[in-house]
Amino acid sequence: MAEILAITNQKGGVGKTTTSLNLGVGLIRSGKRVLFVDVDPQCSLSYIMQGDSSQVTVQELLLRQATAEQAIQKTPEGDLIAASPGLSSMDLVLNQMGKEYRMREGLASVAGQYDYIIIDSPPSLDVLTVNTLTAASQVIVPALADIFSLQGVGQLYSTIQAVKTYCNPNLKILGILLTRHTDRYILNRGMRELLEDTAKEIGSRVFQASVREAVVLREAQAARQSIFSYAPKSKQAEDYQAFVEEFLLLQGK
């Protein structure tokens, strides 16, 4: 049965979609079966993976208008259930009792076919995020080493605690991944220490691996490729590989 991972933060696209893609591709390179699910109305992961948002998407899955099997697309980087811009109105459309469980129910039929299902969650605290957290077993939070990310982690933790109380008691924050990071700046080192203190307070960790800032990551996005496909010998590919290895170590796999 697949382990379902929610990749989310409260800072928009800062490292979130890149982390979802490169973690998943890194796991595939390690021999794991991975399904990507894009739940962000901005459709960034779907775009980078060359998914087609005009086909059956996660919106139809959440509305019970299609099955997960019907929604899965084959892309150059892996299997994907794409997002659609219509997800931005889901707070208005998805209002029936039990709405928090739609994602969990929708993915149940394909969970046995994968080792990991990676959900790229929207940055807003809405019904889509609650659905993602209700379906997931673990949360990974990409973050910058700055005060705004620190505030975002606190806000996200409050939401996760509410979901644990009412919908998913086994949910846990696996860790915080520092992206666009450099230890050359004293401020970044100080903020990392603050994030580590915050992570301890919420029963989590800051991953030892971090992703260094570089234009090559944006170039890979523009090329609609993972860092492993676009620049396999780059330092950032090394960073994401180190993150994948640390992740698997924590999973005991």
Image (tube, rainbow, N blue to C red):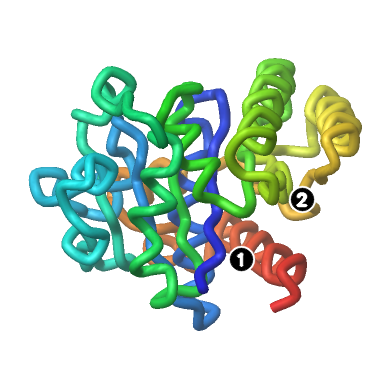
Question: Is 117 in front, or is 165?
Answer: 165
**Residue 129 vs residue 245: left or right?**
left
Tags 2 and 1 touching, CB below 8 Å? no
Q: Which residue is mark 2?
A: 207
* Above-or-below relation of 179 to 190: below
Q: Residue 75: x percent and y percent? A: 23, 65
Asked where in the image residue 159 lies, by quadrant, the reply is: top right
Amino acid type indicated by mark 2: Phe
* Above-or-below relation of 95 to 230: above
Q: Residue 216: x percent and y percent? A: 46, 47
Tag 1, which secondary structure? helix
Q: CA distance from mark 2 to mark 1?
A: 13 Å
Residue at 41%, 36% (x, y): give it: 98
Q: Residues within 10 Å of mark 1 (few under 14, many from 20)?
A: many
Residue at 33%, 21% (x, y): give it: 91
Q: Residues within 10 Å of mark 2 (few under 14, many from 20)?
A: some
Using the image, tell me which numbered label, if any, was put on residue 241. Answer: 1
**Residue 247 vs residue 81: left or right?**
right
